[in-house]
Each structure stands twice: as structure tokens, then as C-alpha cells.
Image (spheres, helix red, strand yellow):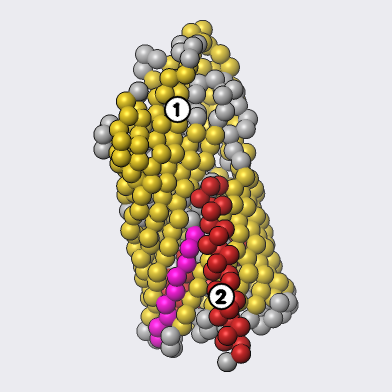
Amino acid sequence: MRTQMQGLCFFKKTLLASAISLTALQVNAAGFQLNVQSATGLGRAFAGDAVIADNASAMARNTATMALFDKTSISTGLNFLKTDINIKNANYTGPTAPSGASSNYDDAGGISIAPNIHVIFPLNEKVAVGFDIYSNFGTATDFNDSFVGSEYGGLTDVKSLNLGLAVSYRFNKQWSVGGGLDIIYGTGELKRELNVGSKVTVLDADAAGFGLGFNLGTVFELNENNRFGLSYHYSPELKAKGDITYRGVTAKDDTLYMGLPDMAEFSGYHRIKNTPYAVHYSVQWIGWSSFDTLDTKAFGTINDYQWKDTMHFSLGGTYYLSDTWTLRAGYMYDQSAQDKVTSISVPDSDRQWFSAGFTYHLSEDANIDVGATYLLGKDVDVDEQKTGISKITGTTHANAILAAVQYSHQF
């Protein structure tokens, strides 16, 4: 009884701390698709994350993994993201620069914090329920007044918060399934100005709203050393309400429509028999073609993106060094969502993830995870124009450093 009461007290304190920390997420979310659910996953480039189930954070990738837990489990952590975004060889032609002017910029990124919490409650040998709070999507770029071509830069700040409610069911020793609802809260702030000698507002939007998604998953356990996971996440079109000014006209309580991508993931995990090593991998499809335009109810299409569906491929390895230490590493190749239409304000490219991490086991039921990733982007040529008004060309490049720490406990 004393152990259960201590566990309940710890859970309440952790949940409160995570809820308070979520204010940092709503202010500082970075990257349109955020892989910030787990420090464990970050340390292996999320290779195998839809099936490994080291701790409760696994439910964010595949709710069927909850069936692999026989104790109440909690994981909570913080992710730190530092983005480095620059524009080089940039030339702007417009009202204040009819003959062209340099528009280079090297400080559009920043530092962000994204917390998370995941909790799994096994009800019996067949059924488990759980909930989690984390972010799947967000992006932030901020070009200050020194940037030449403010109608292409300005402020872009999109944030989301995902509350997941899930259940899993184990059919037998091999097959388990899971599913759940995702309650998504999103905010968007966009600002663009045109310099004609004085600043004229081209776009000023500040909106927020909710959407409802769902997820499904399954796990197949071939034996104790080999298993596979498959999951699908449906993401809704987010309808955010707020005041929107577009080309000098303001619409009060307008609706901003933002398409979010569905995601499907396949993962495998293989512990090499009679060794301390394991290999794992994931293939994920992301339906970014849903983000083709940015529309509002009052003004229609206010920007074209025409993004494409993408894939990412990750491969990782784990070394179970001792009862105290577990080491891991991974690599991911992540395809760009941008196709023919590229953007100064939302730079994107194919990316490589170089990841490493470790678990320190405090006891049989408690551990601390640390993970880190260096994300290496590519140069992307950009050519944008406002017909008859202005044009900008240049090369964007975005790198990032991600680090995370996480505490997990079983009761």
C-alpha cells in the first residue's frame, strides 16, 4: 500500500510539472513535424520506435505497444531544439530596391523546448489504457526588420498540442492491437509586411482551434527476440479562428484552414541471440500533400505550398552494456516535403539524422534516458515572387541540434 501511495503521489507531481512546462511548448515549438515524443527514440533516430517499447513513450508511435507492459508505467521528459537557418546568395527586387538588393540572412532559427508525458495502465493481462501529452507539429521562423524582403519573411509561428487517449488489447502471445483518439489544439501566427517606403501589412493572422484525429496500431511478436509493429495516425484539417488581416482588409473571427498530414509507420526489432546487441529499423510515410494551400474562410487561398508526400528511413542499434547502462545509436534519412514550390519563410530540405543516446537504470523500475541528434540539411534554391510587386531569389539552409532527457518509472 505504501508503494502504491508513493507511486500515486509521484504521478500527480509529474503530471503537474508537465502541464506547467507545456507553456514552454506553446511558446517555443519548432519544426513542422516534431519528433519530440521520447529521449529514448531520439537517441536512435526513432529506429524501431513503433515496436521496441522500452518505456511508456512508445504509445505515441504505436498504441498497440501498451500491450507489452504488465505494470503501470510513466515517462516524462524535455526536448531541447536549436535551429540554425540562413539564407545566402539572396537578391530582392521590389519597391525599395528596383535594381535589386542583397537579402542574405543568418539568424531565422532559435531555441525551443518541448515537454511530454506518457502513462500506461494495464487493467489485466489483455487490456491496457493510457494517455499522453506531446506535440506532433510546429514551426517557427522569425526575420527581424533588417531582412530585406519582409513580405517573404516576417514571423511564422505554428504550434500544436496533442492529448492522446488510447486502449490496447492482446489477442494472444503474438498479436496485439491498439487504437485511440488525438485531441489536437493548434495555434498559428503569421505576419508579413511590404516596405514601400513605409510598412504596409500584407498578412497578419493570429488564430487558434481544435481538431480530432485517431490512431490504430498492431504488434506481432514472432518470439521474445523478434517483433514487428505497424501504426497509422489520422490527422484532421485544423480549423483555427481569429482575426486575420490580408492585403489591408481585416476579417474579424475568421477561420484559418491548415491541413495536417496522416502518418503510417512500420518498425522491426531484433535482439541478436546470445549477444548484448539488437538492431531495429523504421519506415514512415507522411502525407504532406494535404498541406497544399493555406486558406481562410473570408479570403480563400492566401498562400500556395503544394507539398508532397514523403518517407523517412531509419536504422539503429542497441548495446545492452550491463544491468545499469544501455547504449544506442541511429541514422535517419528524412525526405523534404517541398517539391516545385520552395519557401523562404518555411525552409525545408532532405535531412540526415545522426543520433546517439543512453539509458541509466536507477533501479529495476526506474531509469533516466538521454538522447541527442545532429540534423544536417541541404542547400535549397528558392525563387518566390508577388506578381508585379516584388521578387526574391536565394539559397536556404537549415541545420539543427536536438537533445532530450527523460525519466521513466514502473509501479
Residue at the location (54% across, 34% down)? 142
- Amino acid type assigned to the residue bearing label 1 in the image: Arg
Q: Which image quadrant: the N terminus?
A: bottom right
Residue at the location (36% across, 30% down)? 245
- Amino acid type assigned to the residue bearing label 2 in the image: Phe
Rendered location of residue 68, percent (x, y): 49, 80
The tag on residue 192 is 1
Q: Is residue 112 above or below residue 77?
A: above
Label 2: how many Cα within 10 Å (few below 14, some 14–19, many 20+): some
Residue furthest bottom in the image? 1
Residue at the location (39% across, 20% down)? 386
Secondary structure, mark 2, is helix
Is residue 275 visible in the rendered structure shown here? Answer: yes
Rendered location of residue 115, percent (x, y): 56, 59
Q: Is residue 131 magenta?
A: yes
| C-alpha span from label 1 to label 2 | 44 Å
Magenta stretch, overall SS: strand
- On the rendered structure, is 411 left or right of 259? right
Rendered location of residue 406, percent (x, y): 63, 65
Label 1: how many Cα within 10 Å (few below 14, some 14–19, many 20+): many
Q: Is residue 70 above or below residue 278?
A: below
The magenta stretch is 126-134
Is residue 267 visible in the rendered structure shown here? Answer: no
The residue that mark 2 highlights is 11
Q: Is residue 158 magenta?
A: no
Q: What is the total number of numbered labels drawn onto the structure image?
A: 2
Q: Which image quadrant: the C terminus?
A: bottom right
Rendered location of residue 227, percent (x, y): 49, 75
Secondary structure, mark 1, is strand
Tell me which label, 1 or 2, sits earlier in the chain. Answer: 2
